[in-house]
């Protein structure tokens, strides 16, 4: 990009700022997909990977990817003219790292995740981006085409996430046996929906800025990007709209799958290509998720079908378009795309397997079973959740039988409202127990109980029992008194 082209410079900087919203979108999507007890942990992992990746990429990774050779480091320290490119590329590597956090959510340790993110920003992604985007690399010179990161970002992130998920294993109780799959509830579907909207917006920055200049081609790229996501979501909506319960995540993930599948060739595709790719993305996401479940691979947010599967298909399709446009390369275009993909997949798999295996060897790949049950918000960050406290107190009452305990009340929240109602129930239960305690001691005086309604079985039963006992005692006392009088009369009758 020419230093005097201020329009293009402004466009690239604007696209960088827009692309940064991808981090916010990922955070909302992943936070909403997990359980509330792990929501803070997932959000912090998204922040932590951005911080770590930024440092290692700015000082090392960028210079691996941008020089005339892989290890030349001739771009260090970066010059002012290189800063816009550096910041824009930083958004890509941060996205690749963030994809992984969704795949391993709810069971990977925070420390282990930071180490994995460091490797992605330091080595894994920079080497791939050198191969795919640096004109001096062997893969780029062969003609590999990846416009905005379909392979460089999404295949890399998806492959690392797949390997991490396999090595770390599924969440506890996700797969109970070979036949039964346990559905683990998500925290907040609304957050996921808002996150997808933000990611669509951020994708405009990624794909729109990947020319590194502003011209008439930008409009085509933005249109292709938006429409492929829309078509994919629309096709999935058609597939599921007659269901009794319309699934949320599969529709939202289909939109993201459409955005991924178009990314490698958004500068090449025409409208028919976009429609076809949107349909393929929809089916890939829909059936890809089922495939993972059949293989007993636990992906809490569905990132692997979206990023890995759709990224592979989109990259291969881009090669087919390149081959069609250049008659001399009809076979060479798809072939070099396949060679490039296999190389990227192998590199990412070897890197990630070595990383996760080392983490597993040092036992920092996964939290303990107790920590997973308690929730990573508490076990990893010490963040107390009102709902969790409520459940813990209820569980303690159930185990110990101490009905004098009460749930802490957080006023102004739904958890606080539940705690108030539960405590009121416990007050009535404890009052009934006190009545039983008095009855057990034989003290029926000055105790009374008033049922709340005809459906208050416990109170009604106690009330009936007290009345029956009092009536029985009265009858017994009357009988004793009558017997005493009879004995007294008999004694009088025997006197001379």
Image (cartoon, grey):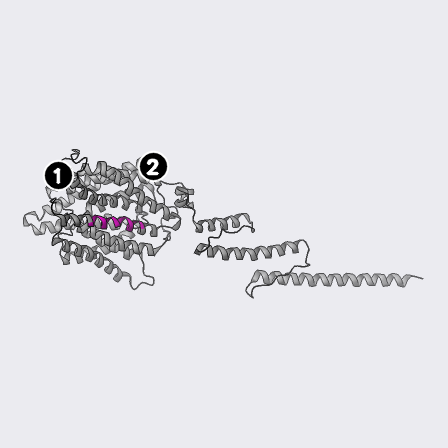
Above/below status of 450 relative to 20: below
Mark number, residue 59? none
Which percent across, then down, holds residue 231? 21, 59
* Residue sitting at x 12%, y 53%: 217
* Mark 1 nearby-residue class (10 Å; few <14, some 14–19, many ≥20): few
SS class of the residue under badge 1?
A: helix
The number of numbered discs placed on residues in the rendered structure image is 2
Mark number, residue 138? 1
Task: Return the disc, 1 or 2, that comes first in the chain's sequence.
Answer: 1
Looking at the image, which is closer to me, 154 or 312? 154
Q: Which of marks 1 and 2 is in front?
A: 1
Which percent across, then down, holds residue 226? 20, 56
SS class of the residue under badge 2?
A: helix
Look at the image and give the residue range highlighted in magenta.
14-27
Pointer 2 residue: 360
- The residue at the far bottom in this view is 454
Which quadrant holds the N terminus?
top left
Q: Distance between the residues labelled 1 and 2?
A: 34 Å
**Is residue 230 rendered to the left or right of residue 358?**
left
**Is residue 282 rendered to the left or right of residue 383?**
left
**Is residue 468 rendered to the left or right of residue 272?**
right
Above/below status of 147 relative to 244: above
Which percent across, then down, holds residue 68? 13, 36
Q: In which quarter of the image is residue 448?
A: bottom right
Taking the image as drawn, is residue 343 in sight?
no
Q: Is the magenta stretch mostly helix, strand or loop?
A: helix
* Residue sitting at x 23%, y 45%: 91
Which quadrant holds the C terminus?
bottom right
């Amino acid at each position: 990009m020419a230093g005097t082209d201020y329009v293009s410079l402004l466009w690239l900087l604007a696209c960088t700022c827009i692309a940064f919203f991808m981090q916010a979108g990922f955070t909302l999507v992943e936070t909403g997909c997990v359980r509330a007890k792990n929501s803070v942990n997932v959000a912090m992992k998204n922040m932590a990977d951005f911080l770590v990746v930024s440092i290692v990429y700015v000082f090392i990774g960028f210079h691996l990817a941008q020089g005339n050779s892989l290890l030349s480091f001739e771009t260090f320290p970066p010059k002012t003219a290189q800063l816009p490119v550096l910041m824009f590329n930083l958004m890509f590597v941060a996205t690749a790292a963030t994809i992984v956090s969704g795949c391993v959510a709810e069971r990977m340790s925070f420390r282990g995740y930071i180490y994995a993110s460091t490797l992605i920003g330091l080595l894994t992604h920079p080497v791939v981006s050198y191969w795919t985007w640096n004109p001096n690399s062997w893969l780029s010179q062969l003609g590999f085409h990846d416009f905005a990161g379909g392979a460089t970002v999404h295949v890399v992130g998806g492959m690392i996430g797949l390997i991490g998920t396999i090595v770390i294993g599924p969440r506890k109780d996700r797969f109970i046996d070979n036949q039964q799959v346990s559905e683990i509830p998500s925290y907040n579907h609304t957050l996921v929906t808002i996150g997808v909207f933000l990611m669509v917006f951020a994708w405009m920055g990624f794909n729109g800025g990947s020319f590194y200049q502003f011209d008439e081609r930008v409009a085509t790229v933005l249109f292709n990007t938006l429409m492929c996501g829309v078509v994919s979501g629309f096709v999935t909506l058609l597939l599921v709209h007659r269901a009794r319960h319309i699934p949320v995540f599969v529709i939202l993930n289909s939109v993201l799958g459409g955005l991924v599948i178009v990314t490698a060739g958004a500068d090449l595709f025409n409208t028919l290509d976009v429609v076809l790719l949107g349909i393929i993305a929809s089916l890939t996401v829909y059936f890809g998720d089922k495939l993972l479940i059949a293989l007993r691979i636990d992906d809490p947010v569905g990132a692997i079908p979206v990023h890995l599967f759709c990224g592979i298909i989109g990259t291969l399709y881009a090669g087919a378009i390149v081959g069609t446009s250049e008659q001399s390369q009809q076979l060479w275009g798809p072939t070099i795309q396949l060679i490039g993909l296999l190389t990227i997949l192998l590199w990412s798999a070897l890197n990630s397997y070595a990383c996760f295996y080392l983490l597993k060897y040092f036992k920092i790949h996964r939290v303990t079973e107790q920590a997973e049950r308690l929730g990573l918000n508490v076990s990893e960050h010490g963040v107390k959740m009102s709902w969790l406290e409520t459940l813990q107190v209820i569980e303690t009452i159930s185990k110990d039988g101490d009905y004098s305990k009460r749930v802490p009340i957080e006023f102004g929240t739904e958890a606080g409202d539940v705690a108030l109602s539960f405590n009121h129930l416990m007050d009535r239960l404890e009052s009934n127990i006190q009545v039983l305690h008095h009855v057990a001691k034989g003290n029926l005086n000055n105790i009374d109980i008033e049922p709340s309604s005809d459906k208050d079985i416990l109170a009604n039963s106690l009330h009936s029992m007290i009345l029956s006992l009092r009536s029985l005692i009265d009858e017994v006392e009357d009988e004793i008194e009558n017997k005493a009088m009879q004995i007294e009369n008999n004694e009088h009758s025997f006197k001379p």
